[in-house]
Image (cartoon, grey):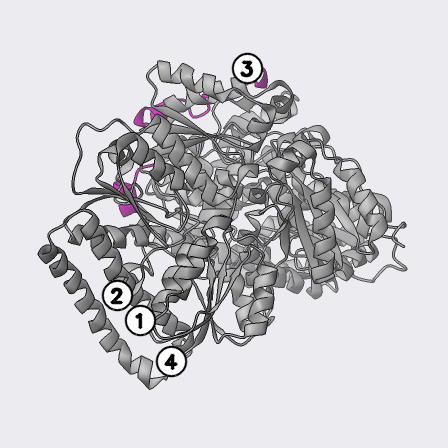
Amino acid sequence: MNTIAERPRYSCSLGGAITTAASVYRVVPVLHAGPGCGMQLFNGIGYVAGFQAPAYIGSSALPSSNTRERDVVFGGEDRLRNLLRSAQEVMDADLYLVLTGCTAALIGDDVESIIEEFRTQGVSIAHASTPGFKGTTYHGYDIVWKAFLDQVVKPPRRRYARLVNIFGIVPGQDAYWQGTLEEIERLLKGLGLEVNTFHTHRQGIKSIHRASEAALNIVLSPWLAQETVDTFQKTFGIPYLRFAGVPVGPTDTEAFLWKVATALEIPQRSAKQSIDREIRWIYDQFEKASLAFTGFDFRHRFAVLGDSGTTIGILRFLANDFGQIPVLAVINEDPPEKIRENIREELSKLEFVQTPEILFTTDPWQAHEKLREIHPSFVLGSSLDKSIAQEIGALHASVSFPITDRLILSRTYSGIRGSAYLIEDFFAPALTAL
Amino acid sequence: MSRNIPVIQKPVPTREERLGSFAAYGGTCAGASGQIKCRCFKGLDRSFSQASVCQEWYSMFTLLTVRNSATIVHGPVGCVSSATCMNIFNRLGQQARGESPIQDARWFSTNLTETEAIHGGEAKLRETVLEVQKRYHPEVIFIFSSCVSGVIGDSVGSIVKNLQKEIRTPLLLSQCEGFRTSVWATGFDSAFHAVGNVLLRKGSHQIKGLVNVISPLTVGRLDELELERILSAVGLKANFIPCYSTIEDLRRSVQAVVTTATCLTFGDYLARHLQEKYGVPYTREVMPLGLEATDRWLREIAKITGNHRKVENFIRAEHRRIAPRLGELREKLHGKRVYVSAGQARAMSFSVLAKELGFELVGTTVYHYDEVISASIHRLGKLFPDAILNIANLQPYETANLIGRLNPDLYLADEITTTWVAKQGIPTMMIYDYGSNYLGYNGVIAIGEKMLMALANPGFVKKLSQHNPLPYKKSWYAQNPFRFIVDSAGV
């Protein structure tokens, strides 16, 4: 993705690293970075992911070396050493994760040795090199997990046959991350599983420590976390299941749950009982929705713009379970070339309708030109796709980053409950004037 | 064809160099005032610091909403991230002006990656400028440099100079590498340096009664309307720049009779430029926030425009008009202990406002200090000698410690800082809310009403504080809050 970026739908790897680490309860990211990186990335990620305030730590509370000219010339190692020493008097943390930004990386500070000094003193500390020029928010997520695996995850004391780890949701970059992880957790608990989401219910550092004791890794993205799950497999013998995205709605969620249940050899009867209960619940919601669905003749030629995981989930649900007509999918997070065919395939496996046009581009200019050409009647994208929706006379809902037209707490469009919320919000722009 | 458009090749001096600015101090208002008098008030540093904002952020913030413009950040993709957040204000501003359809601002990153970190970013800056030109044909293109473009040694000045030879659209370069300054206000200067030197040129004639009001994006439409009301009552017309301005509004500024600023911290550089280069005088008073401050702001303008009698009559009438409600508010706010955190102009104005609205100032955190506010600090030193004065480019760990000690009734600040103080159970009030009125005579009343509302029901923050602590050790609250403010040689 070595092209210029117009109104980018993601931030840099430092940003992704901060949101990923800071949403593990009581892990405190320490920035060895420029004076503005911390706030630039808070205002540029959490703030615009549905106005999410930092949880325990984040935004202006992140310890940061705030590199200045002198450090650029003479090196910033002493500054970092002082910062880490003082941080222990102030910050209440289970783990300090030092994240190096562009400046520190370019001037070549030897951060590793400093980390080692503190580690020797018994400080719970780790390091990830996350200069922004190395990649996007998504890469920041992967780099943090590599650091966790190399430096934080403990060797297993035993294996828990019912414990699973969830990967592939980047907090903040996925504005609905919390609700989505909670819904996945809820569904898997229904199968009798214990779930390491790492980021919900204050699971904290313990969930990272014991990630090696899981029986299965579940990845909810067509490409993220590959190195992570490979390492888990190689080092701890934990197999993984990759899903093309977060399942949305009864069809995909049912398939998801059966796949997990089969992989973990959960007795069929108990799995079926739990899955059937979910399916009954959602069809009861569809039943309720049928007044609006049939009464308003609510059928749209719709477009979805977002990262591959979100787009696949939402598009397949609206097409397969909710009778809508997909006309365009814009995948905007620059997934690796080699998995693009898989993404196409996922977007093509539709039961009743034809495959929509699929566009891989990080460039909203191109995406918007395509919207002008195809003229959908409903655009599900980011808040930055609102104006173009208005221009072409389409309805709009914010489903992908950035989102500035609603507050997001534990809302989700994923799984069973999330698909009901998606239906509510799908009708919202048409009903809001009534 | 564009050889006559001048190009900025050298960065502006930092605020530290130009105005003796700094961002680390802890003491009392009287103490700081005394030190300023004996000229021993000097910049310190921190051996523990938290994330802050860089000058590039504020430089972008200064110009992003100029109409029909495009913003390019020459850096890695992360350095343009906050434009999405600033675009919220951009949209709110258009909505408040009744515009439809609402347009998003246009921002771009040259997206520097590892390749450019080694080979330089010139080609990408070129490509971006030409592509932006092709896509949108903006009237002006703003280019902001970043830490990375600085460290890898891109000579942005000459790159832009060469590009300008090829295209007609003025290229305004703000050299705002974050690491160059701890005082983010330098970013305003970098932006205005470009506006002043590239965009402005001598106007044909003075426009009678035209007043430049330099105003940042955080000053909302209701404040503009209030200032418009005040200025038009005395026969003057406001030219608000640079936010939501057209290029014409910016160019017209050289034809104004006087320049004023809602926040002189923000407008200082451009105001000086307009005076030095185009002979438009400027007023040096702090923001027209508070009764007395608004009086003085208006009188300063009158000194230049010469409509004294009108102004004095208007001031008397306004005071009479708001007196009854002001009296009631004073009674209700009497004795309320308040802490204020804000940029220097706003922090000073809100602190002085204590006298008018009857509350007590227990402390203030000012995001940085420069000479522009020394008079205000003396005033505070007299009014509230023992109140805390903390100079900090955010640093909420110091705030947390202070709030723990002072336990104020109300905390006034921006929404980033209020997030933290709310977790200490202290009712907060946002003082940069785009939808509120703070300035002018009506602003005094509006602030008082807003404070009463903020005090009316502390339920949310009280309960939140019982469940979600701040990320600091308990022992930190017993330490000297300024323990990590040290002589810069020691860091």
- Secondary structure at badge 1 equals loop
| Distance CA(mark 1)–CA(mark 3) | 65 Å
According to the picture, the residue beneath numbered tag 3 turns out to be B490
- Secondary structure at badge 2 equals helix
Give residue B120's position: percent from left, percent from top.
70, 35
Determine the chain carrying the residue at label 1: A
- Secondary structure at badge 3 equals helix
| Residue type indicated by callout 1 | Asp
B415 to the left or right of A231:
right
| Residue type indicated by callout 2 | Pro
According to the picture, the residue beneath numbered tag 4 turns out to be A298
A422 to the left or right of A190:
right
A93 to the left or right of A142:
left
Give the residue displayed 44% in from the left and 35% down from the top: A143
For marks 4 and 1, the one nearer the N-term is: 4
Does mark 3 fall on the same chain as mark 4? no
| Residue type indicated by callout 3 | Gly
Q: Is residue A406 visible?
A: no
